Amino acid sequence: MTILYVLVPLGLVLCLVAVWAFFWAVNTGQFEELDAASVSPLEDDLRPRSGHDDPDFPVPAPSAPGGPPSA
């Protein structure tokens, strides 16, 4: 029963910290543009990669059939 003297205040403190963290995140704009993060990996594939348009860029040799894949 005496453990409640520790657990109840600890639970209240953790709850207050969680509420404070939520309001801090809202006030600093952490929840703005939620869709941008989900689209950014798709946009990375649409951009041309630098160095790959260069004709002197080394191209890995194809691996032999049944052999280990080339790195």
Image (cartoon, grey):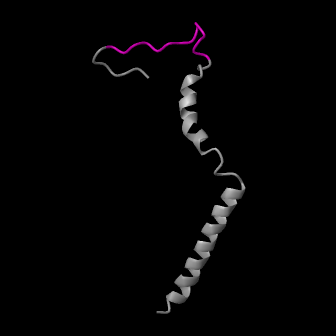
In this rendering, the answer to whether 39 lies above or below 13 is above
Question: Can you say which quadrant of the picture contains the C terminus?
Answer: top left
- Quarter-wise, where is residue 61 in the image? top left
Q: Is residue 67 left or right of residue 27?
A: left
Q: Nearer the viewer, residue 24 or 54?
A: 24
| Residue found at the very far bottom of the displayed protein | 1
Q: Position of residue 57 (x, y in %)?
A: 57, 12
Which residue is at a point 33% across and 13% down the rendered structure image?
Answer: 64
Which residue is at a point 61% across and 76% down the rendered structure image?
Answer: 13
Q: Position of residue 35 (x, y in %)?
A: 58, 41
Magenta span includes 46: no
Residues in magenta?
51-64
Which residue is at a point 53% across and 31% down the rendered structure image?
Answer: 42
In this rendering, the answer to whether 26 lies above or below 59 is below
Magenta span includes 61: yes
In this rendering, the answer to whether 14 lies above or below 65 is below
| Residue found at the very far right of the displayed protein | 28
Q: Is residue 67 left or right of residue 5?
A: left
Which residue is at a point 59% across and 73% down the rendered structure image?
Answer: 14
Q: Main secondary structure of the magenta part?
A: loop
Q: Position of residue 49 (x, y in %)?
A: 59, 20
- Quarter-wise, where is residue 48 in the image? top right
- Quarter-wise, where is residue 46 in the image? top right
Q: Position of residue 21 (x, y in %)?
A: 65, 63
| Residue found at the very far left of the displayed protein | 66
| Residue found at the very far top of the displayed protein | 55
Q: Nearer the viewer, residue 1 or 68?
A: 1
